[in-house]
Image (cartoon, rainbow, N blue to C red):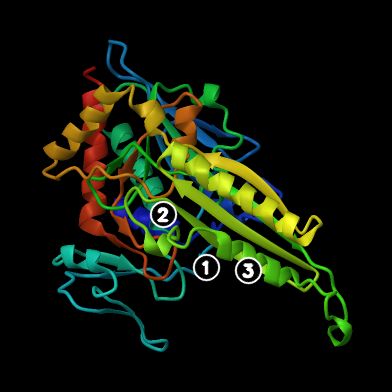
Amino acid sequence: MKLLERFLNYVKYDTQSDSDSKTYPSTDKQWLLLKDLLKELKEFGVKADIDEYGYVIGRIPSNIKKDVPKLALIAHVDTSPDASGKNVQARVIKNYNGGKVLLNEEKEIYLDPKKFPNLNDKLGDDLVVTDGTTLLGADDKLGVAQIMTLVEFIQNNKDFKHGELVIVFTPDEEVGTGTEYIDIEKVDADFGFTLDGSKVGEIAYENFNAATAKLTFIGQSVHPGSAKNKLVNSLDIANEFYGLLPKGLKPELTENYEGFNHLVSQSGTVEKTNMIMIIRNHNKEKFNIQKDNFTLIKEFINDKYGYKACELVLSDSYFNMKEVLDDHEEKIDLAIQAIKENDIEPIIEPIRGGTDGARLSFMGLPCPNLGTGGYNFHGPYEYASIKEMNKALDIVKTIITKFSRL
């Protein structure tokens, strides 16, 4: 099966994860694709299994005589809760010639290069787009499809030299728990790559340090007709807290290595308001200062109102994998060389986010991230370049070849 055909099949699965769920995986519908991937691996003759948490792990034995690093290839099956992944209507735009792409005539939804300038680099490419009502799911079903296409290639081309390969498919990456229960000893690899990036040629080995702040604001409800000097509105306290955070540390005002605090959700009544925020920074010291600010503001609010008006739970999500990968320059250089050998200029940029690779790196599996050819993730303007997705697959093949010569 060709890569495009496989990708178009996978995006039909609704695998949206749920950050509010108490189960793992967070949604039952992820099981459908995970189990089908397991079946597909076994049909290719790969020894594989799935555990109680949904992790699919397969192994392809080395076909060379010397010992070389065992290499893991990793992708996640879930799609973001930010946009619907149900009934994805993907279609191919042949030979994109510039200008706006009509996604949905009825709703007048366009993919516009003025808003998404990455389209300007895609002239002449064939593009996979949505109908403007759902995300596409290239994040990360494109990575899944590339790995499975690679497996099929290897199993059908026994003369392709490679060391031991470990295939890993995970759930719930989009809600920050993609490696929560993974058995790293069962993975048993020396080095890995997540196929979870965007533009072909990307190799990312540094990412945000990340934390989540769960805030609860408690008001004192009194009938508004007799509320003077008595009523305390929890919604006002929440807004006051948010207003005391640094004004410039917002995602819409930052880029590159600049960190941010991002309000994800807020809901409440006069009596009680809940707020969830995420905290991000590549620099560990600045990251800790941002977290300290939340604590200081909480204490200020509580002192001001004279009771526990603000409750704060801070939890770290993942850390910058650069701390680990700085010790693995040789293997990263191999990947950079592989990109160049495929006539692509390497793109070495920090991830303004995180991947399973970040957590895996701190669990003992150094794991940078590779571009897959998808763009505008997490929304209806998501699309993929067919030329780039195939080139990304070629890059992974070259990386495997280089690892087999170590």
Per the image, the residue denoted by label 2 is 139
Q: Residue at x 25, y 59 (%)?
A: 385
Q: Secondary structure at mark 1?
A: loop
Q: Secondary structure at mark 3?
A: helix
Looking at this view, is 53 or 312 the one in front? 312
Q: Residue at x 64, y 45 (%)?
A: 314
Check the image and name the residue furthest to the top: 66
Q: Residue at x 22, y 28 (%)?
A: 334
Residue 250, by quadrant, is bottom left
Q: Secondary structure at mark 2?
A: helix
Looking at this view, is 357 or 290 the one in front? 290
Per the image, the residue denoted by label 3 is 239
Residue 358 vs residue 142: left or right? right
Is residue 93 positioned above or below 55 on the image? below
Is residue 58 positioned above or below 28 on the image? above
Q: Amino acid at mark 3?
A: Asn
Compare marks 2 and 1 and give the one earlier in the sequence. Answer: 1
Q: Amino acid at mark 1?
A: Ser
In this view, the mark in front (3 or 1): 3
Question: How far apart, in angstroms, are the residues tagged by discs 2 and 1?
Answer: 13 Å
Do tag 2 and tag 3 residues touch (Cβ < 8 Å)?
no
Q: In this view of the protein, can residue 183 be seen by the observer?
A: yes
Compare marks 2 and 3 and give the one earlier in the sequence. Answer: 2
Q: Amino acid at mark 2?
A: Asp
Question: How far apart, in angstroms, are the residues tagged by discs 2 and 3?
Answer: 33 Å
**Residue 112 screen position, x and y as percent:** 27, 76
> What crowding class fits label 2: few (fewer than 14 Cα within 10 Å), some (14-19), or many (20 or more)?
many
Per the image, the residue denoted by label 1 is 84
